[in-house]
Amino acid sequence: MSGLTSLATTAATRVPGWDLLVEPWQFAFMQRALLVTVVASVVCALLSCWLVLIGWSLMGDAVAHAVLPGVVLAYLVGAPFAIGAFLFGVGAVALIGGVRETTRLKEDAAIGVVFTTVFAVGVVLVSTTPSQVDLSHVLFGNVLGVSDADVVQVLVLAAVAFAVLVLLRRDFTLYAFDRVHGHVIGLPVRRIGALLLGLLAVTVVVALQAVGVVLAVAMLITPGATAFLLTDRIQHMLLVAPAVAVVAAVAGTWGSYVLDVGSAGLVVVCQGLLFAVAWVVARRRDRRAAGLARRRPAAATRAAT
């Protein structure tokens, strides 16, 4: 990173006006923030492809909010917050499944009841211990203040999640599109679903360090939704979504320094803007395709006459 910074600095001295582009990356805290944000964005983007395809976007929202009590309790006992967040994330998934299977409630209702209640418990815990826990950092992240230990933690968890997502991408894709066929050919459908939920909990822990509880939801949904608008092939989605996430991460982190605003919020805003662009592109493409489809029968009729 230091070598890249020195090269960029040299280029900035030669090209007038480029100093604003390279100035933020001369600081160690900005380099750590960029690294953590890019890594978290890529992992979240990969997982978001399957969350969008399966229809688990609301599940991602639930897990992201449900980890708050775990984070608070971890702070109180002096344990790594990742442990508390992961345990409560997995616990929330299990509780949602239990409510759904033992009641007549549909999945969305079970998710809504569980995650709002668990999140509220976290808010109560924070309000009773204001001196120990900074609510704004837990909810909205503090990527500019990450330490070297935080960076290592994010890199390790992200590497594990990334490796599993890439190695088992075909199994996850089959699970998303045709679980019955997967079961027939011997795919352990239940285990694949449980593994995806476990990866969701791990990915939320990774995203927490960059953007916090609330904004982690956007990182788990927006890149996959953007890629879904631009392509109908899962192989392309797995490339487009991380690319979108990286662009938003770099632009948001750089913009937060220049504009003096919150990094996490601006990264998510950049993701939203890219989604808006993809929506416009997709609308034009669909209209063009519809126009071609209408003209073909008319041309065939004229040719026949």
Image (cartoon, rainbow, N blue to C red):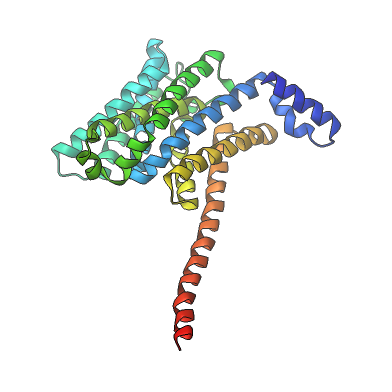
Question: Eyeballing the image, is 203 above or below 108?
Answer: above
Question: Is residue 128 visible to the viewer in this orientation of the structure?
Answer: no
Determine the residue located farthest toward the top in the rendered image. 78
Measuring from the top left, give residue 11's x and y in whole percent: 80, 30
Q: Quadrant of the N terminus?
A: top right
Q: Is residue 195 among what the camera can see? A: yes
Question: Residue at 36% across / 37% down in the picture?
Answer: 170
- In this rendering, is residue 96 above or below 68? below
Q: Nearer the viewer, residue 223 or 186?
A: 186
Q: Residue at x 38, y 16 (%)?
A: 74
* Along the line of sight, the residue nearer the viewer: 234 or 22: 234
Q: How many marks?
A: 0
Q: Position of residue 242 (x, y in %)?
A: 51, 37
* x 32%, y 24%: residue: 88
The x and y percentages for residue 279 are: 51, 55
Outermost residue on the bottom side: it is 305
Q: Nearer the viewer, residue 183 or 27?
A: 183
- Which residue is painted at 68% across and 36% down in the image? 259
Q: Quadrant of residue 125?
A: top left
